[in-house]
Each structure stands twice: as C-alpha cells, then as structure tokens.
Amino acid sequence: MSAAATSVEKHFARRLPKIELHAHLTGSISRACLHAIWRAKKAQDAAFDVEDPLVAIPSDKVDYDLETFFPLFSSYIYKLCSDLPSIEYSTKAVLQDFQADGVVYLELRTTPRAIPDKAITKDDYVKTVLSILNAWNYDATNTLRAYLILSVDRRNTIAQAEEVVDLCIKYRPAGVVGIDLCGDPAKGDVRSFTNTFTRAKAAGLKMTLHFAEAKVSATDLELKTLLSWRPDRLGHVIHVKEEYCKIIERENIGVELCLSCNVHARMITGTYSDHHFGMWRHKNVPVALSTDDVGVFCSPLSVEYELAVKHFSLSPAEVCKLCEGVVGSIFAGENEKDRLRKIYAEWDGWMG
C-alpha cells in the first residue's frame, strides 16, 4: 500500500467521530501522565520508592501478555495513582487524550478501589471519578461525553461483587451506566457471580462482560453461564464456537473488539489481518472497535480504525455503517444516541 494511501487512512481515522466502549480507566493513563504524577510525588517525598514510569514502562514496550499485563497494575500503576489528587489528575488526562483523538462518546470502566492507608473507600473512589466526568460533561466546550461502568473483578468475593452492584445502583443518577465483569481470565469461577449479575439485571443495569478472551475462559460451562446473565455487550469474544456466535447474533449482543491489544498481547494467532474483526463485521451485531488499554498498548482509537481500514479494506461507507451500528448499543440514554446519530448524519468526511 502506498504512503499516500496510508496518509489518507490516517487522516480519515483521526477526523472520524468515534465511539469508545471498551476502555479501562487505569489502563488508559498515558506514560506521560504517570510520569507527571511520579515527578509530583517524588518532589513531595524524596523517599518515594516507585520507579519512574518512563523507565518501568518504556515507551516502545507494548508486548504485554496476559501473564505480565495484570501485575503491571497491582505492582506499579496503582502505587502511583494512590490518592484522590492523582486519581482526579489521571482521570482528567484520560478524558483529554480521548477527546484529542476525536472520540465523541466514551464509556470508561473501572473496578471500585479502596485505599485504606489514605482512608479512601470504594464509595469515595467512585464519587471522585464521577465528579471529574460530570464536570467534563457539563463543560459545553468539550466535544466528548463520558460515562462510567463499574467492574466486578473475577477475583472478587461474592460480597465484593455485591458491593459493586450497590455502587452502580447508588450512582446511576450521577453517570454510572452499566456493570462489567473483568480481570485475569485464569482466575475465579464466574458461576459464583450468577446471583449478583441477576440482581444487577433486575435493577435495570446495562451489562458488558469480558467473554472468551483466553482459551482458559472459553469453556462451554463458562460461556453458557455468562450468556445466561443476558448481557447487552461482550468484550474480546475471541475463542467463540459457532453455536455461541449464533446466540450472540440472535440476541443482537454488541461486541467490543480490540485489535492492537489482541495482537500485542498475543491473544490471537497471527496479526491484524487475522483478527476476528474480519468475521464479526459480517455478523448482524453492533461491532465497536475499542482500545482496551491505550496507556499500555499505545494505540489510540483512531489507530484502531486506521488498522481496520487498512487490513480489511473498509470503504468510508462501511466505516459509516459500523459507526452508526454502534450507537444503539451504547449504555447512555436516548439523548446521547440522538446526539451521536446527528453527528454521523452531519459529518462531512464520508465522501473523502
């Protein structure tokens, strides 16, 4: 492919108004933002013993797999974002980065986190993140609107999972739009959360689940269990038998696909052109290209669209159909859906 063609793809993808539905808040924090937090903490306390992010997470390192990915958060990023000021600063930086990339609608997901040594409860954490999102949304100069999904980690106890549902319900009026199941796919038995997610569904919460992202979490037992919860969307959907693909299509369950994450973390066999996006885009379901953890894999949503256009030869009309199809699967209300439909109807980039 010529350099000129690549330049056109890049320009188109960058200008395209984009919807991001599978972005983890902590995983979306850039190395530059983490470095700024590190410098501030180091200036306050010379004995602060966390390594400089620019050294610990080199800018050219994106090949984190499922074994090295999760420890990155528990042993490093959480130690930097360990108080309310750093959580506020990093959340605002994430919003700025997504807006700068042309994202017009964003659902951020995060696992409610308590920080006992700073007397921060999970309620405090959720309230703090929401305060940043709401201040952002109330600023009419911002083109991005952002909402929150709260996650249950597969390693959680039932009591911890129930607490997440309680927080979702409590803060739904303040901008929590759904609940997620996430975490190390090799951990936990999802059947233990069936009653929890059944309660969430009964309470009217929208639901997205990490689904078949690794072979270990793609057993018939697990996938049948997750589908029995009647999710609205599914993330990754990599190791999925045809029988489950048919159910997903029949139930019109949206899928959140993360090209760069899956390639860099070797969650799929092959490269971009081998990605299961090539299969799902021909199914009758909403397909949302997403970043997953842009701070780790360094591929903003515009690059994900650029890769899709390049490796699957998508025309502007096909991208338009993809984007418009995602609108109906967002978790915010009809006002947001109307705003997004209007944006796509009026965008001047479809004709090149």
Image (spheres, grey):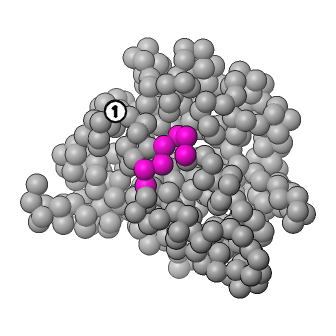
Of residues 2 and 318, the one drawn nearer to the viewer in this rendering: 2
Amino acid of disc 1: Thr
Side of 123 relative to 250 (left or right): right
Q: Position of residue 165 (x, y in %)?
A: 78, 41
Q: Identify the element where label 1 is drawn.
A: loop
Residue extent of the magenta highlight: 62-68
Quadrant of image for the C terminus: bottom left
Q: How many marks?
A: 1
* Frontmost residue, 137 versus 243: 243
Residue 100 placed where, x, y %? 44, 72
Q: Residue at x 50, y 33 (%)?
A: 213
Badge 1: few (under 14), some or many (20 or more) residues near its Cα, within 10 Å? few
Q: Residue furthest bottom?
A: 43
Residue 327 shows up from this direction: no
**Can residue 17 be seen in this snapshot?**
yes
The x, y position of residue 343, in whole percent, is 40, 62
Tell me if 236 is positioned left or right of 194 in this view.
left
Check if residue 66 falls in the magenta segment.
yes
Residue picked out by circle 1 = 269
Q: Where, by quadrant of the figure, is residue 246 drawn?
A: top left
Measuring 25% from the left and 67% from the top, which residue is drawn there?
11
**Magenta-drawn stretch contains 326:** no
For image coordinates 44% across by 23% down, the residue present is: 240
49 is higher (above) or lower (below) than 220: below
Identity of the residue drawn at 64% across and 54% down:
73
Q: Position of residue 86 (x, y in %)?
A: 71, 72
